[in-house]
Image (cartoon, rainbow, N blue to C red):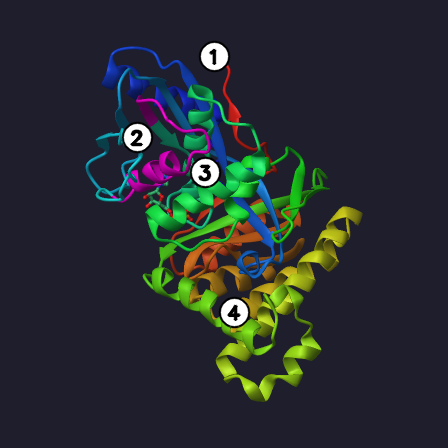
Amino acid sequence: MASPVPAVGDVLEEARRLYRQTFGSCPQVEVCAPGRVNLIGEHTDYNDGFVLPMALALVTVVVGSPDPGRAVTIVTANQDVEEPRRVEFNLPSDGSPLSPGKPGWANYVKGVVQHYRAPPVPGFKAVIASSVPLGGGLSSSASLEVAVYTFLQQLHPDDGDAVAKAVACQQAEHTHAGVPCGIMDQLVSVLGQEAHALLIDCRSMEVTPIPLSDPSVVILITNSNVKHSLTGSEYPARRKQCMEAASVLGRQSLRDAALEDLEDARSRMDEVTYRRARHVIQEIQRTVRGSEFLKKGFYEEFGKLMVESHNSLRDLYEVSCGELDQLVSAALEVDGVFGSRMTGGGFGGCTVTLLQAHAVDKAVLHIQERYSGTATFYVTTPSEGARLLSR
Ligand code: ADP
């Protein structure tokens, strides 16, 4: 059966409890930011393309209080991170940068402090708790960054510019976690809307809400619970290949290239670069078409694009893996399934499946039966972006 998504209130209670236990008082500020699932538009964000994600009911909660002076203490409730789970550091008083270090998870917090748009950040103590699985491709990292930023906004407000907030969190991931990610994850974590997916133009940062609240359809996330170690090196390699392809085509990014341009230039690039570019150009088109289908409730058509997207990620972009392919094939064998694909960066993590609501239990059983590993399932609905949690 699909795991029930833990209520935000339960995650908040966990954070409050740990805060009281650690600091002996109640936190003054409580915020959360969601993880996300991308319905279509994979590896297009860093090519200035379109993506179609939605925010999840899975969230990272940050609770805390300002602390006089320059000291920061952060504690994570998550058992799956590198030790220690309590970290203390001082905010530099002379404006010098806050360097990344060990443990790795604290770098997401340090990065956000570093890039916060209304310095100086005051000292604080905080506890992090999360229902987003770590490293599962549902953006626990972006939800942590955005939750920390939202927390800082309560301590020392910035101008409230939502896109600039997402960009600052993306910068944090670049400089402090060493991941050259696109803007999708942070944007959807900031701007997510209940009952809507978001069509995001990653060039203009324009966000168009796409209604998605038909009770007869369901979005099923299946976590393969595997993560192959390739992820770290392959992601920057793909980014580089896309830039190379754009430069051969004389374009600023692959967003500006048509398939005909690519075919004309095929002899001027190696086969691998050609395949990467072909995925990106077609995936951008699929995403725009897909958002139209979804808006009209054309789920069959949307589902076909999801399958095309998966096949392209497997064959052209080469970021899938045996486990994800198995999960997608198994889902597609079930009556009532419109489409299924890997979602997120790849090499493990999750698949996303669009299906008729009545087919969920059957789909979960069938996928589990066919999968060689142990999967975790979540039935999700599009949820709100980062927010203050009232006490
Ligand atoms: P994901 O797809 O979940 O974003 P990443 O590998 O990009 O996967 O990021 C996961 C990392 O983010 C974790 O290894 C950890 O360093 C950090 N992180 C995410 N959530 C938390 C949390 N609740 N507490 C501490 N660190 C976290």
Q: CA distance from mark 1 to mark 3?
A: 21 Å
Q: CA distance from mark 2 to mark 1?
A: 20 Å
The residue at the point 51 percent across, 69 percent down is 243
Mark 4 or 3, nearer chain start:
3
Between label 4 and label 3, give the one nearer the viewer. 4
Q: Secondary structure at mark 4?
A: helix
Q: Secondary structure at mark 2?
A: loop
Q: Position of residue 311 (x, y in %)?
A: 57, 69
User: Magenta includes 120?
Assistant: yes
Q: Classify residue 20 as left or right of residue 366.
A: left
Dot 2 beta carbon under 8 Å from ligand 1: yes
Q: Position of residue 332 (x, y in %)?
A: 60, 61
Amino acid carrying label 4: it is: Cys
Mark 1 or 3, nearer chain start:
3
Amino acid carrying label 3: it is: Ser
Name the residue furthest right.
296
Name the residue furthest left.
84
* In contact (CB < 8 Å): disc 2 and disc 1: no
Dot 3 beta carbon under 8 Å from ligand 1: yes
In the rendered image, which residue does mark 2 sit on?
77
Q: Which residues are magenta?
A: 104-127
Q: Residue 143 — which label?
A: 3
Mark 2 or 3, nearer chain start:
2
